[in-house]
Amino acid sequence: MKKLTITIFSLLLSLHLLAAYYVAGNGTTGNPWCNGKSWVVNGSPMTDQGNGTWSVTFQSVPAGSYEFKVTNGISTWYGVNKFSADCSNLYASGGDNIAFSITATQDITITYNGSKICLTGSVGNDAPDPDQFAKVGVPSEYEGVMLQAFYWDSHKLTTFSRTKYIDFLNSGLADEMGRNFDLVWFPPSGNGGGVGYYTKCYSNLDSDWGTKAKLQELINKLHGYDCKVIADIVINHMQSNSGWAKSFATNNFGSYGTYTLSSQHICSGDEAFTSSSSDSKSLPHGNADTGTNDGGCRDLDHTSSYVQDMCKAYTSWMKNVIGFDGFRYDMTLGYNGQYLSMYNLASEPFFSVSECWTDLNKIKSHLEAASYNTLAFDFPAKYKMNSWKGGSSYTYLRNPGLRSLGLSKFAVTFIDNHDTFHRSDNQSGEFLGYNTDLSAKRDKIIEANAYLLMMPGVPCVFWPHWYVCRDEINQLIAIRKQAGIHSESNVSDETAGANYYYATITGHRGRVILRMGSKRDTDTPAGYTRAYAGANFDIYTIQGTDVDNISIVNRPLKVMENGQIYILRNGVRYTIDGCVAE
């Protein structure tokens, strides 16, 4: 028995030594990438090249977006920190996993020598061109404030005022929006279900929200206030008119062209070709998806030049014919960011924002892939807001989200949106929890919006919050604009504890001090004016033509913790006798 045990152990050891390293990644059945195995720690063995280098080649990998790590086959994973661009001809990025995209079928080789990972393709690709970074859709030091002018089913619900185009025009709300906001985001204007997110035709603008004529009348009304209008662009997926993928509507964009999709413009991994209940399994299909699959509709293959031409025509038509000034791109995790950049460079919107609903590092990777020709919704900062509200501690508000990476210029900040706001009593990610009566939560709504509107980035106010607290939020917007706070404003002297938050924000025309929490210092700083006294916060302002020379901004701040008074100066906490507090 002992001899048998030794033999088995020796056999297992020899098998392990056959491949000291492996590649694990987001493989899918039928795709040669990672042998079709998804994140199997020892699924794709590498071959010893005899010089301390190990390698593996995956042949004929189709166009798409991929991720991987090198592993020791047991428990150790090597990711983006080991990736070397010097020995790679495929551009890669990522927060932890190594992420890359290819637009043509090719052989992919990965090598590892114990210190660096190299990624090469038989065709290769180019890194994003820095000269193309932030060329369109991202205004510099932008002072604008955005409004999301709808919530889920608000074309028929009256809880926070119905939001059809005609309602805005007839109620005077369009005028009030135009006077207070610089950007107004409307829902998908194409004909389709799910408040427009499951569109059947991009060019049919008679939707649940109103007619094309009323939409253009509303756009013209807002333009009269120099307020720009943002279209919700859904180009990740589309509904078929017949069967799963048998017949699609014709999109007529006038002088920009007419386009009719077919099954060959749908990604190969779509349910239309994989589901046992599909009536379209045998139809021709496109390449692999370059992003995350959407199970509710047919996913468009953005590697197709026909799909690319259609999206360029659609965005250009929406801007130059219908009158929109910019775009909010829906579900951009569904396709690689390079295509979003492609469409923006073709249509040249004033403003672009991407719904990349994921973690901080992946948002950064998405922005990089899009050559920074878009902003992104700052979901990580939104969830910090949720934690502050739920856990009460103001420390969550300190340097959150994209601001922590120095990317405020590319951040659209928000508290809630149509997806996170309640549609049922167990809605995930909502700021205030399920309650259709927001009037009982006015103080928390106003306090949260005070923070939102005093910070850098482009703040996006949510319709129900604005509708319930219009006077207060309008006043906060006016304070922001008076100081000239912008998307790249500097935040200094930022400090926070369980029950207080302080920050100084510098704008083009002045500075703002924001103090929040029950233990905040309520003395007015020398040289400042109290501009707003909230239920649990205060805002102080100072104006000047040369804000860099505005003085007296680092005045000590008093806080009380556990019955003891402390002094905060430049982020350091001192006892009342001047000693640094432990």
Image (tube, rainbow, N blue to C red):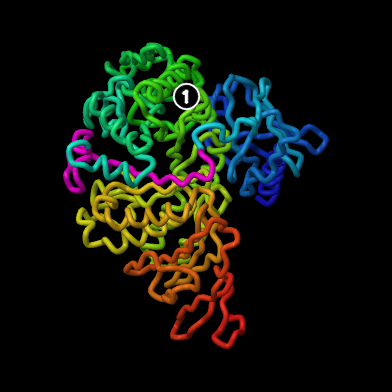
Decide if residue 420 is in sight here.
no
Point out the image quarter for the C terminus: bottom right
For residue 214: magenta? no
Task: Give the side of residue 148 with respect to residue 44, left or right.
Answer: left
Badge 1 element: helix
> Can you identify the residue that label 1 sits on?
347
Find the magenta span and give its range: 139-168
- Residue at the image point whose x is 36% and y is 63% from the top: 390
- Residue at the image point whose x is 55% and y is 46% from the top: 361
Query: How far across and down, in percent of the image, does residue 446 sit?
Result: 32, 60
The outermost residue toward the right is 51
The residue lying toward the viewer, choosing from 50 and 393, is 393
Position of residue 14 relative to residue 246, above or below, is: below
- Residue at the image point whose x is 20% and y is 56% from the top: 437
| Quadrant in the rendering for residue 17 | top right
| Quadrant in the rendering for residue 520 | bottom left
Position of residue 361 relative to residue 36, above or below, is: below
Query: How far across and down, in percent of the image, does residue 127 sit?
Result: 65, 30
